[in-house]
Image (cartoon, rainbow, N blue to C red):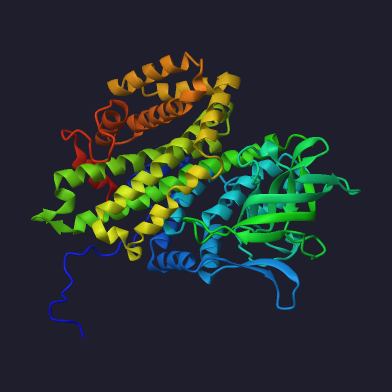
């Protein structure tokens, strides 16, 4: 029996049973902006349905369970036979099944498919981020497979299916399939050209035998994997099926699962190849070029995933402060807390707006948009993922001690927040990739400048930032040592341009003041007090 003094008051109710899509004004407006009129109603309806699912008590519970009971490796069966299987909690399979059925692997063949999928991916990350890994890699494998029309015809219908089939069996017998990827090795990391895995041609045309290892292979229970190995003609891309056509298991030795900081629900493994059958994808010696389409798509998903994590962190912080009282009033109405929340909301909206704009470029597919993606994707991946961790930590602090307790969900967001900055190439890799685009593909810079130039004249701070950026771009001597600064400015100017064009004036004004005009400190909550911060916070409040 509770003690007579144990009356619970002044606690925020859980943020549950709400439409994650409808409660996110920035996301809903981006979808309306980028989806064609003939698919807009259908897109909004499906996203709202997924939003209600993502915000339900049931899915939130599944997310907690999938992380509380992480995957477990079984290398052998009871008789000593090598099986190399990973057991997942049922909640993981339920989440993954929902993600597949929601079209998170089906963007390539649907009108407006990339915008619809991007919005769905951003929302589903908020429910549980770990299952985003196999969903992302399956989606991203399609452009790599399309370099081989025969392989694409065989595999693309399976990868873009909305049916989740968890069974390990021949892919030809499955209504849907998932893909993983293995590029990095312990001696090379991001330097994939240092790979030592070897590929020996077999008698069958296009078939090889692989010998070697992969230091990181996420989602090892997938049906197939794109991997890099050294063939006689150089680094080459290969498709490694988990189960062969005759029903036998391919040689895919899972040595151990990684014990990770976050992303606990998702299995990441070290794997060995020892006489492993593989099919070549593309030409020998052109493996990096073949797989780069997959890498670009997963990099955009890194930005989307971080945008989702930031949105959930901000939503939780604003929701808490709208209900919690302190010092004679609601926390959300206190000027200093309002400044913090507004600053966090700016970061979240800028990330969402940028990520959805890039997804729309994929849907457009024109030369100009492809050129924009060449610079904007690595720049967005660099900057948005870098901002995720400080946003998550600050948002957790808004809940005070409650935010440090597992039951709040905030610690899981904090642990997850650094992942996307490391996955698919850490910050320096992204910065160097932008430099390569600037040097080798002048059309990419032209496309970028045309994009940001659409907002010229609308805000003096943005105009000044564009001018400063042009000055910096005019001198690329010794640029590698300042590449991070340059890429940061590229991302911020692009975000500023998009917000000036599309966001409410209060949001654009605050962003330009704090991010481009230098009128803010290094910590969140240091925006000029003269701005309309109350409107910025209210816009971020998750009320649907």
Q: Quadrant of residue 469?
A: top left
| Residue 529 pos. (x, y %) | 16, 35
Which residue is most to the front?
A: 187
Kindly tell me whether residue 450 is visible in this rendering. Answer: yes
Q: Name the residue located 75 percent from the left edge and 54 percent from the top edge.
A: 273
Q: Is residue 422 above or below residue 495?
A: below
Q: Nearer the viewer, residue 137 or 367?
A: 137
Kindly tell me whether residue 156 is visible in this rendering. Answer: no
| Residue 179 pos. (x, y %) | 65, 53
Quadrant including the N terminus:
bottom left
User: Is residue 154 toward the left or the right of residue 443 in the image?
Assistant: right
User: Is residue 394 toward the left or the right of residue 120 in the image?
Assistant: left
Quadrant including the C terminus:
bottom left
Which residue is most to the right?
A: 203
Q: Nearer the viewer, residue 299 or 401?
A: 401
| Residue 290 pos. (x, y %) | 70, 37
User: Is residue 8 toward the left or the right of residue 270 in the image?
Assistant: left
Please state the total of marks drawn on the protein image. 0
Q: Name the residue located 43 percent from the left edge and 62 percent from the top edge.
A: 53
| Residue 403 pos. (x, y %) | 29, 58
Q: Quadrant of residue 255?
A: bottom right
Q: Name the residue located 54 percent from the left edge and 61 percent from the top edge.
A: 96
Q: Is residue 385 above or below residue 224?
A: above
Q: Quadrant of residue 258?
A: bottom right
Q: Name the residue located 43 percent from the left edge and 66 percent from the top edge.
A: 64
Which residue is most to the left?
A: 328
């Amino acid at each position: 029996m509770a003690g007579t003094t144990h009356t619970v008051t002044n606690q925020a109710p859980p943020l549950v049973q709400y439409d994650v899509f409808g409660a996110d004004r920035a996301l809903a407006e981006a979808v309306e902006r980028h989806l064609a009129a003939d698919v807009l109603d259908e897109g909004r309806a499906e996203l709202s349905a997924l939003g209600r699912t993502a915000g339900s008590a049931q899915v939130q519970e599944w997310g907690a369970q999938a992380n509380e009971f992480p995957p477990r490796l079984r290398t052998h069966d009871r008789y000593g036979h090598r099986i190399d299987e990973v057991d997942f909690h049922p909640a993981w399979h339920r989440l993954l099944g929902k993600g597949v059925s929601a079209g998170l692997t089906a963007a390539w063949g649907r009108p407006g498919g990339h915008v619809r999928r991007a919005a769905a991916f951003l929302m589903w990350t908020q429910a549980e981020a770990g299952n985003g890994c196999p969903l992302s890699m399956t989606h991203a494998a399609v452009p790599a497979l399309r370099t081989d029309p025969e392989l694409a015809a065989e595999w693309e219908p399976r990868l873009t299916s909305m049916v989740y089939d968890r069974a390990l069996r021949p892919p030809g017998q499955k209504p849907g399939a998932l893909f993983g990827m293995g590029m990095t090795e312990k001696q090379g990391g991001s330097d994939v050209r240092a790979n030592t895995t070897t590929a020996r041609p077999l008698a069958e045309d296009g078939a090889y035998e692989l010998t070697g290892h992969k230091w990181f292979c996420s989602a090892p229970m997938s049906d197939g994997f794109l991997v890099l190995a050294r063939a006689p003609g150089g680094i080459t891309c290969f498709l490694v099926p988990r189960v062969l056509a005759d029903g036998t298991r391919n040689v895919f030795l899972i040595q151990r699962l990684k014990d990770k900081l976050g992303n606990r629900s998702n299995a990441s493994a070290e794997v060995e190849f020892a006489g492993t059958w593989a099919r070549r994808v593309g030409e020998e010696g052109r493996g990096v070029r073949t797989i780069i389409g997959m890498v670009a798509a997963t990099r955009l998903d890194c930005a989307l995933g971080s945008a989702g994590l930031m949105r959930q962190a901000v939503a939780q912080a604003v929701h808490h402060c709208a209900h919690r009282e302190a010092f004679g009033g609601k926390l959300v109405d206190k000027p200093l807390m309002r400044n913090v929340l507004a600053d966090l909301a700016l970061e979240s909206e800028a990330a969402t707006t940028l990520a959805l704009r890039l997804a729309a470029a994929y849907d457009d597919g024109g030369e100009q948009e492809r050129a924009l993606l060449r610079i904007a994707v690595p720049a967005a991946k660099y900057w948005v993922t870098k901002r995720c961790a400080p946003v998550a930590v600050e948002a957790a602090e808004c809940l005070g001690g409650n935010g440090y307790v597992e039951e709040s969900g905030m610690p899981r967001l904090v642990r997850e927040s650094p992942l996307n900055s490391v996955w698919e190439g850490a910050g320096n890799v992204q910065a160097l990739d932008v430099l390569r685009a600037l040097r080798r593909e002048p059309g990419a810079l032209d496309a970028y400048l045309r994009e940001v130039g659409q907002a010229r004249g609308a805000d003096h701070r943005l105009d000044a930032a564009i001018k400063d950026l042009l000055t910096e771009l005019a001198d690329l001597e010794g640029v590698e040592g300042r590449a991070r600064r340059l890429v940061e400015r590229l991302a911020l100017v692009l975000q500023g341009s998009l917000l000036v064009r599309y966001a409410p004036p209060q949001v654009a004004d605050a962003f330009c003041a704090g991010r481009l005009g230098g009128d803010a400190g290094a910590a969140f909550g240091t925006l000029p007090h003269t701005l309309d911060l109350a409107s910025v916070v209210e816009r971020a409040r998750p009320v649907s």
